[in-house]
Each structure stands twice: as C-alpha cells, then as structure tokens.
Amino acid sequence: MLTKKQVQVFDFIKTYRSKNDYAPSLEEIRRKFKLASVSTSHYYISKLQNAGFLNKEHNQPRAVSTVEAKQTVEIPILGAIAAGQPIEAIEIPDETITITRDEIGKQGKHYALRVQGSSMIDEGIFDGDIVVIRKQEVAENGQTVVAVIDDNQATLKKLYRENGKFRLQPANPTLFPIYRDEVEVRGVVVKIIRNLESQLDQGQSRDEKYVRK
C-alpha cells in the first residue's frame, strides 16, 4: 500500500518515463517535490521498489522502470468493520488504496475495511488497521471473515461450524465467541495493512496515512 506522497512520486516517474523513455534523476524528483535532499528522493524510490511498483534495471542509468498498470489495483475502502461488538454494515466507498495484484491474487473482487476494536489481535489485526477482503459467500472453518448477523450488524471474526450452529470466534482470550443459527458471509480476509505511526513518511501528516483518491 502506498502513501499519498508515494503515489505522487510514482505518478511523476510513470509520466516522465512515458515522455522520455527513461526515469527522472533523483535531483529532478527532489526539485519536483521540493524535498530536502536527494537522499529523500532515494527514500521514495526504495519504498516504491519494496512495494513492487518499481523495478530496478541493473547496469543502466536512471535504472528504474514502472510495473505495468495491470499489476496494480485500486481497492475501495467501504467503511469500518468491528473487531469487537458488531456494528451496522455500511458500504459507502470514500477512499481507495493502491496495492499490487500479487498481494491479493488474481482471482475475485476485493474491497477494504478499517478495523475498529481489538478482538482479533492474536491474528495480528489491530485497531486502525485496514483489511482487504475477497468477496465470497462461503468460507472454510477457521478463516477470518466479514460476517453479518442479526439486524445487518457486521463483525470481523474467525468462522467455525459446529453442532448445527455458527461460531464467530474472536482472536482475543479476554472475549467470548458469538453463536448464531444463521450468518451471512460477505468475504474473507486476504491481506492486512498495518497502521504504524512510526512508518509514516517524513513530514507526512496523520491524515495522510492512507492513499486518498
């Protein structure tokens, strides 16, 4: 997943390459975005390479190339999902995140939700994280799912079938499972995007943690 500034740098490199057949220099990137030094330009290049958006071409000047557009995908964030007490299921896309197709696989349709609560911490899903969901109506025992119960209440839990009922199991030993006769599955978790303050780009505000389109 890219930050807002990383998307801007990536778009600049992609546009520059389409016009010139080679990538901009670190100094050109620095001037374009008024960065403090070329080392900051290198920082953004490294982030984009690590995220799979740039390829490094060895033994060539200005040796980076953009990954083909078909390998990246924008995923809509449809709201929040409770990792705790169920909340009303709302699907109103207001943002997108940009990730590589390799991160989520090539099959199926996907959407993303912000996590609220701490019921899934033992699965490495924390309050404020974003989970990417593959849309599907069935799930295997033990998969982490978006489950809708009762009066359109959505929750993020591990799903189990036992004794003719469904058990929605939190991954937090201090919380109790939820049992229901009927559960509507709206997808399974395929990727977790961590919300780490310590990994924010230098000079980035708290409101720019996720890509906004």
Image (cartoon, helix red, strand yellow):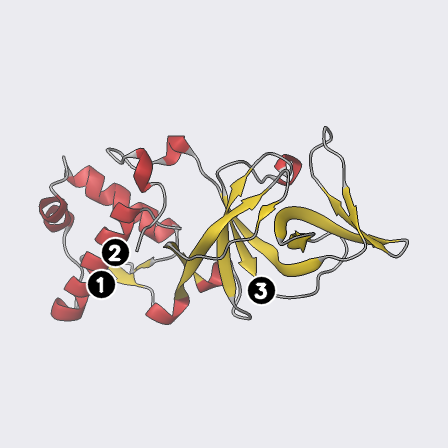
Alpha carbon separation for disc pair 1 and 2: 6 Å
Q: Could you tell me which secondary element the residue under label 3 belongs to?
A: loop
Q: Could you tell me which secondary element the residue under label 2 belongs to?
A: helix
Q: Quadrant of residue 98?
A: bottom left
Q: Quadrant of residue 31?
A: top left
* Image disc number at residue 93: none
Q: Is residue 41 above or below residue 8?
A: above
Alpha carbon separation for disc pair 2 and 3: 29 Å
Callout 1, which amino acid? Lys
Asked whether the residues under the numbered discs 3 and 1 touch, taking CB atoms below 8 Å apart as contact, a structural biologist would say: no
- Residue lying furthest right: 163
Name the spot of residue 10 as percent of width and height, x first. 25, 56
* Image disc number at residue 135: 3
Reading the image, the residue beneath label 1 is: 14
Callout 3, which amino acid? Lys
Q: Is residue 75 above or below residue 131?
A: below
Label 1 environment density (alpha carbons within 10 Å; few <14, some 14–19, many ≥20): many
Name the spot of residue 96 as percent of width and height, x first. 38, 56
Label 2 environment density (alpha carbons within 10 Å; few <14, some 14–19, many ≥20): some
Alpha carbon separation for disc pair 3 and 1: 31 Å
Reading the image, the residue beneath label 2 is: 10
| Residue displayed at 52% across by 69% down | 106
Asked whether the residues under the numbered discs 1 and 2 touch, taking CB atoms below 8 Å apart as contact, a structural biologist would say: yes
Name the spot of residue 40 as percent of width and height, x first. 21, 39
| Residue displayed at 26% across by 34% down | 202
Name the spot of residue 85 as percent of width and height, x first. 64, 39
- Residue lying furthest top: 174
- The answer to whether 19 appears left or right of 75 in the picture is left
Report the front residue among 169 and 108.
169
Q: Could you tell me which secondary element the residue under label 1 belongs to?
A: helix
Eye-nearest disc, 2 or 3: 3
| Residue displayed at 15% across by 49% down | 29
